[in-house]
Amino acid sequence: MRGTAVLGSAGTLIAGALVAGALAAPAANAASNRNSRDAEAIGVAVAAARAARAGIDWQDCPADWGLEKPIQCGWVTVPVDYAKPNGKTIKLAVDRIDATGTPAEHQGALVYNPGGPGGSGLRFPRRVTTKSKIWANAARAYDFVGFDPRGVGHSAPISCVDPTEFVKGPKLDPVPDSEADKLAQRKLAAEYAKGCAEKSGDMLPYMTTPNTARDLDVIRAALGEKKLNFVGVSYGTYLGAVYGTLFPTHVRRMVLDSVVNPSTRNIWYQANLGQDIAFEGRLTDWMSWVAQHDDAYHLGNTLAEVRHQWDTLRAAAKKEPLGGTVGPAELIGFFQYAPYYDSMWAPVAEAWSAYVAGDPQPLIDAAAADLTDTAGNIAAENGNAVYNAVECADAPWPTSWKKWDRDNSRLHAQYPFMTWANAWMNLPCATWAAPHQRPVQVRTGKGLPPVLITQSERDAATPYAGAVELHKRFKGSRLITERDAGSHGITNLPNPCINPKVEDYLLTGRLDATDQTCAPHATPQP
């Protein structure tokens, strides 16, 4: 799943999950969904057969994609609506780097999705060109393949607002002081949803996880692969779970890292509420670490003192935005990286420490948007548009503002760091013009091979319960738990217990006889 605060729309952090539009009667929806999915199953078979015949015309990547040789790029054509495979199509951007081993070692393509929804996987082959030690042996056996999912990046990108306006700060403080503040945020969220409909309305009904899973099967066919080898991280685990449900016999190897809880009750409203609780816990972990290293950061030698420094900083930015651009919203957008990733513990603490020591510029530079970064701003706005489009279309949301207000007010009292920022981010779903579907019932389909699941215990973005739930649903799967750890996306971190297990599974298909618990990766140092 994506970060929350960094993805707010222009003028505010938009979050929350209140799908607009009345919900159809359950019985009618169920019948409609069955008929639709039958047609889509036929459509994806038609599209995959075409892709298998066409293959992919691999060429050097466009210079402005930032993908160095020998990475190659190409396109795969997919239907916008799989129920109408002969209708409108779009092209998906894909890239690959050939396996580095001998022909005898070659096991096909390994396809990657980094999450989001809204993330691009095109940088995955760079794990080979940048000589990642963790992935070196897998790279001998597999072509590493990335792609931009539908609506993302170079794959028929969608948009909701002007990118420059989207990133401009300071945005409204996400924590409301009054009913007027809440009304202002609700208005901005509704305007954002309207902008999505106006700029990208033709695509919005088809921006669903099942359609992206169908796209993934067409990419598999275009690669000439009978079965899919897949690594999904964060939201990519939900994409993998849906793919495994829809196409169980098409899976060869699947690694799902940092898992979205796939329960239909969780997608997506409850998922965002669960994040609020988990982020608070991981923020506490980080602030405790900062206190332990007071000799380096001088932010307090107890958790309470460090937390007080945060409250002081937030209040100062609310009174007068730092550098005129960094208010509480921008601070949350930057500080949330620490609960997300251990690799950001020290950088965030360093910028914060400099501010307290009298130099605000490092914090301003880190938290403020670079309005001159046109490509980066376009990518940020596009990522947020896709995030909302997929989550709004994937499932029904509560339509009552009273419920939304009650749930988030209750959570904010105990978990104040992310709750309202997360709420406003998802709130465009409350007035979303495009229809939604019922979530896929993730389950073990006949022929699904054993899947490897990896998860840290204190992950903020995808709480641990999600891995447990998927493990129950995918029979024969194995769960590797990284105890006393909370970084998001652990297969790309050095851990002498986890890395060999992932590698062995990808290279041989072997899994441990039982679930495994691993010690945490190395604790960050100042």
Image (cartoon, rainbow, N blue to C red):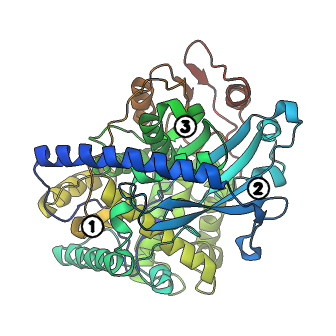
Residue 301 visible to the viewer: no
Q: Which residue type does callout 1 highlight?
A: Ala
Residue, disc 1 = 434
Q: Nearer the viewer, residue 143 or 407?
A: 143
Q: Which residue type does callout 3 highlight?
A: Leu
Q: Secondary structure at mark 2?
A: helix
**Residue 185 percent location from the top left of the image:** 27, 75
**Residue 211 percent location from the top left of the image:** 42, 53
Evaluate if marks 1 and 2 touch, with contact meaning CB atoms under 8 Å apart: no
Residue 204 visible to the viewer: yes
Q: Residues within 10 Å of mark 3 (few under 14, many from 20)?
A: many
Q: Which residue type does callout 2 highlight?
A: Arg
Residue, disc 2 = 126
Using residue 9 as the reference point, say whether residue 490 is left or right of it: right
**Rounded to the nearest whole Å, what is the CA distance between mark 1 and mark 2?**
36 Å
* Comes first in the chain, label 1 or label 2: 2
Evaluate if marks 3 and 2 touch, with contact meaning CB atoms under 8 Å apart: no
**Residue 218 percent location from the top left of the image:** 54, 50
Q: Residue at x 50, y 41 (%)?
A: 240
Q: Residues within 10 Å of mark 2 (few under 14, many from 20)?
A: many
* Comes first in the chain, label 3 or label 2: 2
**Rounded to the nearest whole Å, what is the CA distance between mark 1 and mark 3?**
30 Å
Residue, disc 3 = 256
Using residue 147 as the reference point, say whether residue 508 is left or right of it: right
Q: Secondary structure at mark 3?
A: strand
Q: Residues within 10 Å of mark 1 (few under 14, many from 20)?
A: many
Using residue 422 as the reference point, say whether residue 130 is left or right of it: right
